[in-house]
């Protein structure tokens, strides 16, 4: 499905639309607003610029597909993902959207990547590696205070992880959970 189609689906009035993308469900723009304002404000909203749409800026958030019934039990399956009909107040959507676009990019080194030579997943992978390298270099000065035992959730993440199939937010959350176990105990 083209990004243009995804954006149109996610802008439908009175619908929260979740697009299936690999093992994740992703909400764009208006649907990201509905998802984070009405249901899960703890989801990280990221912004991006779509070059093939004349540098149009978008926002999105995502969560693992297998969590759908736990998160939104009354959704309906569609050919492209899931939808939830509702009477959603969108009066603050434009302000929220502008605020999310005004936030600094989550990827400070993104401007150094020549995106025309990479597809979207490759760019995300490069950015994740840059963040991981920066995080590791920053923490090399500190010695690891002790060994840790991974939680079942961390083990499941590692077991199911596939190169290029994971959103940066999930990698960040995984790394942060390990970091907390190591240095904040």
Image: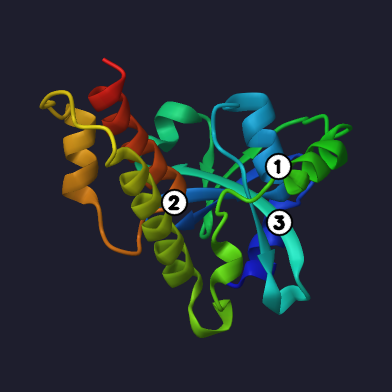
Camera-side residue: 169 or 143?
143
Q: What percent of the width, then of the height, locates residue 106?
A: 57, 48
Crowding at label 1, few (<14), some or many (≥20) Cα neighbours within 10 Å?
some
Residue picked out by circle 3: 58
Q: Are marks 3 and 1 in contact (CB under 8 Å)?
A: no
Q: Nearer the viewer, mark 3 or mark 1?
A: 3
**What residue is rendered at 57% in x and 27% in y?**
40
User: In the drawing, what numbered circle is on residue 95?
Assistant: none
At mark 2, the secondary structure is: helix
In this rendering, position of residue 165 left or right of residue 74:
left
Quadrant of the rendered image containing residue 149? top left
* Distance between the alpha carbons at the discs numbered 3 and 1: 18 Å
**What residue is rendered at 48% in x and 55% in y?**
20
**What residue is rendered at 65% in x and 42% in y?**
32
Residue picked out by circle 2: 168
Residue picked out by circle 1: 15
């Amino acid at each position: 499905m083209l990004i243009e189609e995804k954006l149109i689906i996610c802008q439908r009035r009175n619908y929260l639309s979740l697009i299936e993308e690999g093992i994740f469900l992703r909400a764009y723009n208006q649907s990201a607003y509905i998802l984070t304002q009405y249901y899960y404000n703890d989801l990280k909203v990221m912004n991006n610029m779509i070059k093939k749409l004349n540098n149009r800026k978008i926002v999105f958030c995502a969560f693992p597909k297998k969590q759908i019934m736990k998160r939104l039990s009354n959704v309906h399956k569609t050919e492209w993902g899931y939808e939830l009909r509702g009477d959603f107040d969108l009066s603050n959507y434009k302000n929220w959207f502008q605020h999310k676009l005004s936030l600094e990019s989550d990827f400070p080194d993104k401007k150094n990547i020549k995106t025309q030579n990479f597809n979207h997943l490759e760019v995300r992978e490069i950015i994740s590696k840059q963040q991981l390298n920066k995080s590791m270099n920053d923490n090399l000065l500190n010695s690891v205070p002790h060994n840790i035992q991974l939680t079942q959730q961390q083990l499941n993440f590692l077991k199911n992880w596939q190169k290029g199939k994971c959103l940066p937010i999930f990698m960040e959350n995984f790394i942060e959970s390990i970091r907390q176990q190591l240095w904040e105990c």
